[in-house]
Amino acid sequence: MGTAAGSEETRKSPKTYQQIIMHIRGAISSGELRPGDRLPPETELARSLGVSRPTVREALKVLEALNLLESSTGPTGGTFVRAFSGVGVADSLKDSITLLLDVDELSLEELWAAREAIETRAVGLAAVRRTEGDLATMWGTIESDEYREFDDYFPDITFHRAIADASGNRLLSLFMLSIHLTLRTLAERYVLPSKSKQVSQDQHRLVYEAILDRDEKLARARMEEHLRMAYEVYRHAVPRSAEDLPAQRAGYASTDVPPDGFRPGAS
């Protein structure tokens, strides 16, 4: 009986490297370790924590993968606590989302459903809470769209991020940015129709006008329409599986508009 209990306790106990991870994360959370602080060398950490150097190295690798630490070489090199930013976290989420898409553990439909839930909520809040500064940022991205090719996704990201920022919810902004960084990766990887650029600009203006008028209901409706049309563009450009990749890339590039009768900008 005692042996079984002991076995259960051992099985539930975190591994040594996991304990080190929790220790360092706790020090970061408490402020004992701050962004830019340099950690002691591996040998010193191992000695102070009473563990082996390989165990410390394993824990540090995990913390680097989590973007909590970063390493550099040279005379001034070492392991440092990373400066935290929403962009860094969103970029890490983007990498994970893209990987899930690549291995067919996540579908474009699921990604878009999440995008719609986040962005329609954000645009409704933005219509209520937006400031003059928020409006200026949104309008600036719409104007810059006039002078950029479609393959430059930056204006689209900044427009939607400005909406998220205007919502006043930083977590919504973080999730939205991670999704848009994922979409930027897809836009760079696959051929998207150049004609969809103009319809995107036009829809951005309509969304902006609803936010300007503080019309929450209209802003949500216009965002839903914008996302619906954008989804059609991506749905026909992004292959559903790896075996569809060559045909999708070649076929879509030759038409410059999505199949099935969808024409960006058509009324």
Image: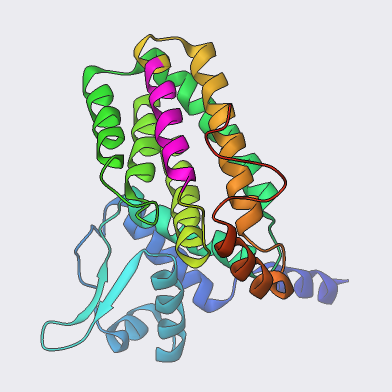
Whether residue 256 is in magenta: the answer is no
Q: Is residue 214 above or below residue 154?
A: above
Question: Is 15 on the left or on the right of 241, as rendered?
Answer: left
Q: Quadrant of residue 228?
A: top right
Dividing the image into 4 quarters, which one contains the C terminus? top right
Question: Is 215 on the left or on the right of 253, as rendered?
Answer: left
Q: Residue furthest right?
A: 1
The segment highlighted magenta reads: 195-209
Residue in the image at 60% along x and 68% along y? 249
Q: Is residue 234 above or below residue 251?
A: above
Whether residue 196 is in magenta: the answer is yes
Residue in the image at 62% along x and 60% along y? 238
Label the magenta part by its dominant secondary structure.
Answer: helix
Q: Nearer the viewer, residue 250 or 222?
A: 250
Q: Quadrant of residue 76?
A: bottom left
Q: Nearer the viewer, residue 136 or 20?
A: 136
Image coords of residue 83 (percent x, y)? 25, 58
Question: Is 135 on the left or on the right of 175, as rendered?
Answer: left
Q: Residue furthest front?
A: 255
Instruction: Report the label total.
Output: 0
Image coords of residue 214 (percent x, y)? 40, 10
Image coords of residue 74 (percent x, y)? 15, 89
Image coords of residue 30 (percent x, y)? 32, 51
Q: Residue furthest left?
A: 75
Residue in the image at 45% along x and 63% along y? 188
